[in-house]
Amino acid sequence: MAQVMTTGNFAELLWPGIKEIYGTRYDMHPTMYTEFMEVMTSKQAFEKVQGLTGFPLAAVKEQGQEAVFSQMFQGFQQEFLHLTYSIGGVVTREMVEDDLYNQINQIPRLLAESMRQTEEIVATNVLNNAFSTTGPDGVALISASHPLVGAGGTGSNAPSTASDLTQTSLEQGIIDVKDFRDDQGLRLNTEVEKLITGRGYFFTARKILETQYETTTANNDVNVISNMNIKPVTTNFITDQDAWFLTTNNPSKLKFFRRRSAEIQRDNDFATDNLKIKTSTRFSTGFDDWRAIYGTAGA
């Protein structure tokens, strides 16, 4: 049953003399999940993404013998099921009429911000759960044991030892990303595009990426990372402040499918005269190809 906001809930808004009202006009964080997710629209109840391998390395063909024939393989499939998210408020007609400070008219803006942050949290939880939530290949998004469908064996998008963010660990991460292979074991030209951190690494990330010389050392060596155009991205919705991630130029990114955009709706209940205001949207988030990202939960 809906909770109805009446004049009894906001008695102070019915009387003159309030100098200022606080609590509803804060500066909010800009949308950040678009920095590490590909946002796409959908016109279906769900979306499916299917993996497919190429061919392995060629083999020597002896004179007079047939060419070596190999095969492609069907990879893993991921389904994105769109869920509906909604929130609203119910206000009595008397409260609307007697509000002296125009606070009831702020409800649509406040609901919109609630929905925007809901999207941010759900999307960022792909990173927050990257070390635990199982993906289409049967292991977590960040794992040292991603199965390679064609070649056999495994691939890794995690350091051999979990480590905090330092210049040395970031350099090793870049090296690890450059060693990504496809499902047939062929080497990929994978490069790092962005460094994603929580607020705990805000200054560390920028010092490493923007300092001309090596950080935290008396050496006079050039910091090569500062010339690699890796973009620092800080999101306040990462829960583990020791975790950090590298997004890559892999064609398949982390995904945000928008089935229906958020919208504000108003209606008056005929029987009660109550004003109802709500917002709702439909979307799904997730991942398919682990090569889109590299990360660690920190030491």
Image (cartoon, rainbow, N blue to C red):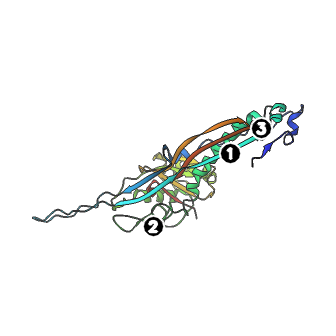
Residue in view at x 47 percent, y 58 percent: 173
First in sequence: mark 1 vs mark 3: 1
Q: CA distance from mark 2 to mark 1?
A: 40 Å
- Tell me if mark 3 has few (under 14), some (14-19) or many (20+) residues whose alpha carbon lies within 10 angstroms of its own: few
Q: Splitting the image into 4 quarters, where does residue 93 fall?
A: top right
Q: Residue furthest left?
A: 64
Front-most of residues 202 and 244: 244
Tag 1 residue = 87
Q: Position of residue 105 (x, y in %)?
A: 75, 33
Q: Position of residue 94 (x, y in %)?
A: 83, 34
Q: Amino acid at mark 2?
A: Ser
Tag 2 residue = 145
Q: Compared to 76, does 119 lie above or below?
A: above
- Tell me if mark 2 has few (under 14), some (14-19) or many (20+) residues whose alpha carbon lies within 10 angstroms of its own: some
Q: Position of residue 101 (x, y in %)?
A: 82, 31
Q: CA distance from mark 3 to mark 2?
A: 60 Å
Tag 3 residue = 271
Residue 217 seen in render: no
Left or right: residue 55 versus residue 66 is right
Q: Position of residue 161 (x, y in %)?
A: 51, 67
Front-most of residues 241 and 119: 119
Q: Amino acid at mark 3?
A: Ala
Foreground mark, 3 or 2? Answer: 3
